[in-house]
Image (spheres, grey):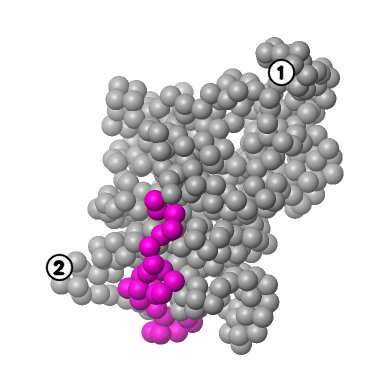
Amino acid sequence: MPEYPKVTGYTLVDKIGGGGFSNVFKAIDFTHHRAAACKHIPLTLQTTDKERKTLDKEMRIHAALDHVHVLKFVNAVIVEVRHRELYWPGYYMLLELAGGGDLFDKIAPDRGVEDDTAHHFFGQLIAGMTYIHSQGVCHRDLKPENILLDAGGTLKISDYGLSAVYKLKDSGRTRTLTERCGSLPYVAPELANEVPYHAEPIDVWGCGVILFTMLVGNTPWDEPTTRSPEFRRYLDRTIFLEDPWNRIGERVLSLVCGMLEVDPARRLTLGQVAAHSWLVRPSQLLKKGPIVLAERLTNGLRENGDLDIAAPDLGQAMDVDGDEYGGPTNTNHTQFTQKLMLFSQTQAGTRYTPNLTRFYARLPPAQLLPLIQSALEGHGVRCKASGDNELLLRVGGFDKRKVRFKGWVEVERYSSRSDGDEDGDASGDSMGEDGDDGKVGFEGSFCSMARDEGNPISWRQLWKALVQSEGVKEWVLWR
């Protein structure tokens, strides 16, 4: 049976994500006590030269970028198919570990974040994109799932698989691009035409969609064509009288509309975006520290009750020192990730879990999982049992914006005893019993939903629909 190779001293230990064509693992350098992420793209006998050239280009472009708001490319190795008896073939890209997870996993759907919070993170996005363009690179795939946070709360732009070099740094000479790529809710309207397009306005449009999504907790339309009723109302300006557009402040709305200008020749440049009156002011959160930043970011989830489900009070002290190697590495980082509730109490102890789509239930796993599957299928989600883990479901489908999502739902046993007894029988009384101090423990499950592909906000909406579904909600533990 082949195994995963060490990648420049890093051992692949846990799968933490992935999409249709790749898997992402947490990788540990045990010698130097360092953590990274490793993206594995399999190679097979059917892999074409064109696919290899695309991967080579991604690595070459990403490795050349070095900025505080660009997810760092650390190193890479390639295992050829001829070595498949020993190792899983593929490209192994070692990347900075985004310890804070997805930015948009922390944002309440259909609500968004406060103005100052959006201003803080959007300023970092524009700083990162200004640098990327200065290196002659166009990202071409800006969307919520590619905006990450490190363990200290700093924004990181990720995924350079669709990026392209459009400008020579030495001469400044530019070229137009022709490849049609990206997801419909986020692409610029000029990509609907079969003519070459200028690179920089494409990314400005993507930044505009991301800012809108930060402010209101949803994307503005299904696609930027007249097939979309919302986009048609945007073109005739009647949409500005509707929710959520009428909730956006006048100054920031002028910035959003400047970036979402349909004519790329009239669209704001990144320089004009950076100089806009809404953005040019200093960040009000920059000096307030990681705890305040985390509180502001998750305020909507706290007020709508999502955090009461994802991080209930189990009546037990939680040791939050982080993963031995993969968790926070200094005081500020610990403060940020701890305040974000990125730690879960599991049967094996405290676990670093960078997604907030999880819950506890007062029902053993073998009884809970069929209810979860039934509820998800009732919402139109395709479910498939994992072959090697009977408590793991592979799920997929399309969200309301017609964007594909894929992920996993995993259920594991969890028992809570206020008197310190952690060894209860999971098949016993699912409603728990009183401990010596009067607190109620329970025998039940811990359920985590991990997204591989798709919009983090849509994934959160699916999670919320699940915990509110008939047959499931009566077992969910709330704070």
Count residues near mark 2 (Cα–Cα under 10 Å), then give few for <14, some for 14-19, many for 20+.
few
Residue at 45% x, 67% y is 207
Quadrant for residue 8, please give it: top left
- Disc 1 residue type? Ser
Separation (CA) of disc 1 from disc 2: 66 Å
How many numbered badges does the structure rendering display? 2
Query: Depth-wise, is mark 1 or mark 2 nearer the camera?
Result: 1
Residue at 84% x, 44% y is 470
Please give left or right for residue 251 compared with residue 467 in the image. Answer: left
Q: Nearer the viewer, residue 195 or 209?
A: 209
Residue 46: percent from left, percent from top: 43, 47
* Residue that extends furthest to the left in the rendered view of this protein: 170
Count residues near mark 1 (Cα–Cα under 10 Å), then give few for <14, some for 14-19, many for 20+.
some
Above or below residue 167? Residue 316 is: above
In what element is the residue under mark 2? Answer: loop
Q: Nearer the viewer, residue 194 or 159?
A: 159
Span shown in magenta: 260-287
Residue at 28% x, 69% y is 166
Reply yes or no: does residue 282 show up in magenta: yes
Residue 213: percent from left, percent from top: 56, 63
Residue 418 shows which numbered tag? 1
Above or below residue 280? Residue 289 is: above
In what element is the residue under mark 1? Answer: loop
Residue at label 2? 170
Q: Nearer the viewer, residue 277 or 196?
A: 277
